[in-house]
Amino acid sequence: DSGVTQTPKHLITATGQRVTLRCSPRSGDLSVYWYQQSLDQGLQFLIQYYNGEERAKGNILERFSAQQFPDLHSELNLSSLELGDSALYFCASSVQVGVNTGELFFGEGSRLTVL
Amino acid sequence: AQSVTQPDIHITVSEGASLELRCNYSYGATPYLFWYVQSPGQGLQLLLKYFSGDTLVQGIKGFEAEFKRSQSSFNLRKPSVHWSDAAEYFCAVANQAGTALIFGKGTTLSVSS
């Protein structure tokens, strides 16, 4: 158990819908990262937050957004869903703002299926 | 831009045999390199990391990796594989800003008895 909690574990929805994925980082971790894992693209970095502020953006679509709340949990919002958005979405957390000085701890992921 | 290539999509090794998983990276400066393992239905777990210093790094579960700058490689090794090592293995490099990890496509390891 990494200490990172993601909900829901599984989600099935229809095209055009909107979903919210939730992540609670390890106790004491200030950084939250979101990754998308799909068969064709592999693991793609989406976005990072540190202590409530957005710090880095990766290959995140405009239809997707995220935020980190004062209690440090984070939510990833996916809207106008398309079939290609079906993937496993991972949240990871770390104490530091960067990845070069420590370890990222990953949750078990939220599997999104868009029908 | 930084990138990671894992040439082998799937490898099968007999239990007790040695293992080497290949990883090549593209990066201009000294890279920060990582190996993660993902068991079915689980998140990713860090096996080991290289930041600087000794080019042979030891990790958890008996794994080690060697950084070879001349070959732009960071191959993962284990002298004797156990059935529980069957999983997917990801090599990663930190991006230049140090804000994210860039992952390879992964290598699936199967262990035969």
Image (cartoon, rainbow, N blue to C red):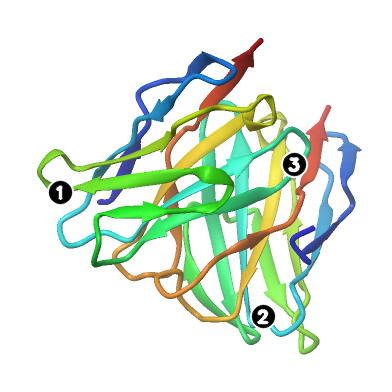
SS assignment at label 3: loop
Q: Residues within 10 Å of mark 3 (few under 14, many from 20)?
A: many
SS assignment at label 1: helix
Place of residue B101 in the rendered image (x, y in percent of width and height, measured from the top left): 45, 57
Q: Is residue B89 left or right of residue B71?
A: right
Q: Which residue is mark 3?
A: A81
> What label does residue A29 carry, if any?
2
Extreme-top residue of the structure = B113
- Residue at 50% x, 17% y: name it: B10
Say above or below: B60 vs A14: below
State the residue in front, A114 or A45. A45
Disc nearest the viewer among 2 and 3: 2
Disc nearest the viewer among 3 and 1: 1
Amino acid at pointer 2: Asp
Counting residues from the start of the chain, the first of labels 2 and 3 encountered is 2
Whole-angstrom CA distance, mark 2 to mark 3, is 30 Å
Q: Residues within 10 Å of mark 2 (few under 14, many from 20)?
A: many
Q: Quadrant of residue B18?
A: top left
Q: Which residue is mark 1?
A: B69
SS assignment at label 2: loop
Amino acid at pointer 1: Arg
State the residue in front, A65 or B75. B75
Say above or below: A47 vs A88: below
Amino acid at pointer 3: Leu
